[in-house]
Image: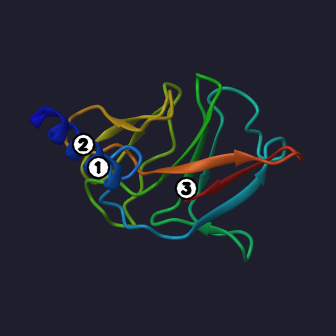
Amino acid sequence: MNIHKHLLLFVLLAGLSGCDGYVSSIPDMEVYLKRNLTTEKLNTFGAYLYVTEPVLAIDRIGFGGLLIVHAQDNIFYAVDLACPHEVDPDVRISPPDVMGICKCPTCGEEYDMSYGMGTPRKGISKETLKHYNVSFDDNDYIIVTR
């Protein structure tokens, strides 16, 4: 009977902590970006869109900006450009190199975006890059939201 109480407590706590329990050090900011996949040339693996400034009045680009990547697993991912170790909107990771690696110019951490996760490689940062939701509409547009 006691084990059931502990299991119930665990399930309740896990539910209260969010879907995956992850809380980023990057502050929550408004995110909304809608772009055409073909126009932005995002149709090929390794393609990316690096956004540091809003273009349209409705654009909301998060804390440090947005990186949208068409990863090797044929899935699109969107992350905040701000390094979670630095937590400064002006300290942005670099665009991904040919191997999908982005680097923070301040702390030197490298983040692997080849499969969209933004996983730190050197251990300087203890967090992945902050992720955003990616969806598509019927007109070949990608939409990024928080």
Q: Which residue is mark 1?
A: 12
134 over 42 or under it: above or below: below
> Residue at (45%, 47%) from the top-left corner?
94
C-alpha separation, residue under disc 1 versus residue under disc 2: 6 Å
Q: Nearer the viewer, mark 3 or mark 1?
A: 1
Q: Which residue is mark 2?
A: 8
Q: Position of residue 55 (x, y in %)?
A: 71, 69
**Callout 3 touching callout 1 (CB < 8 Å):** no
Say whether disc 2 or disc 3 marks the residue closer to the N-terminus: 2
> Residue at (36%, 35%) from the top-left corner?
119
> Residue at (84%, 41%) from the top-left corner?
38
User: The residue under label 2 is which amino acid type?
Assistant: Leu
Q: Which residue is mark 3?
A: 66
Single out the residue that lies furthest toward the right.
Answer: 139
Q: Quadrant of residue 84?
A: bottom left
Q: Is residue 53 left or right of residue 7?
A: right
133 over 44 or under it: above or below: below
Q: Nearer the viewer, mark 1 or mark 2?
A: 2
Say whether disc 3 or disc 1 marks the residue closer to the N-terminus: 1
User: The residue under label 3 is which amino acid type?
Assistant: Leu
User: The residue under label 1 is which amino acid type?
Assistant: Leu
- Identify which residue, 14 or 34, lies in the foreground: 14
**Callout 1 touching callout 2 (CB < 8 Å):** yes
Q: Position of residue 63 (x, y in %)?
A: 45, 66
